[in-house]
Image: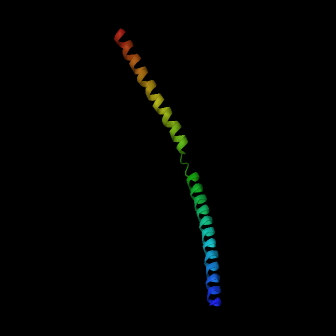
Amino acid sequence: MTANNRFFDDLSKLMTNAMGVAQGAKGEAQTAFNSWIDRWLAERDFVTREEFEAVREMAIKARAENAELRAEIEALKVKA
């Protein structure tokens, strides 16, 4: 009976260690994959979300200014 318990204890330790190794390998693989993706994206000159939002805000402001200027020009045409 004791040998049987010892066998299961050893098997349990072995499985626990194997799970730890598997989780470590998973973490390393995920880190390597994320690094590869980051390099791939950087090589393609994609813009970041922050850069996109900044340019978007500039475009919205420019459109509003254009609309105001267009209204002023129309008002000047009517006066002339």
- In the rendered image of this protein, does residue 42 appear above or below residue 74? below
- In the rendered image of this protein, does residue 27 appear above or below residue 77? below
The quadrant in which the N terminus is found is bottom right
Residue 58 lies left or right of residue 9; in this view the side is: left
Please tell me which residue is depicted at 63% across the width and 68% down the height of the picture. 24
Let me know if residue 20 appears in the view. Answer: yes
Please tell me which residue is depicted at 55% across the width and 45% down the height of the picture. 48
Task: Specify the quadrant of the image occupied by residue 11.
Answer: bottom right
The quadrant in which the C terminus is found is top left
Q: Position of residue 3 (x, y in %)?
A: 65, 90
Let me know if residue 80 appears in the view. Answer: no
Please tell me which residue is depicted at 55% across the width and 41% down the height of the picture. 50
Residue 73 lies left or right of residue 32; in this view the side is: left
Q: How is the image coloured?
A: rainbow
Q: Nearer the viewer, residue 2 or 16?
A: 2
Q: Position of residue 71 (x, y in %)?
A: 39, 19
Q: Residue furthest left?
A: 78
Q: Position of residue 39 (x, y in %)?
A: 60, 56
Task: Specify the quadrant of the image occupied by residue 10.
Answer: bottom right
Q: Nearer the viewer, residue 30 or 7?
A: 7
- In the rendered image of this protein, does residue 57 appear above or below residue 13? above
Please tell me which residue is depicted at 44% across the width and 29% down the height of the picture. 63
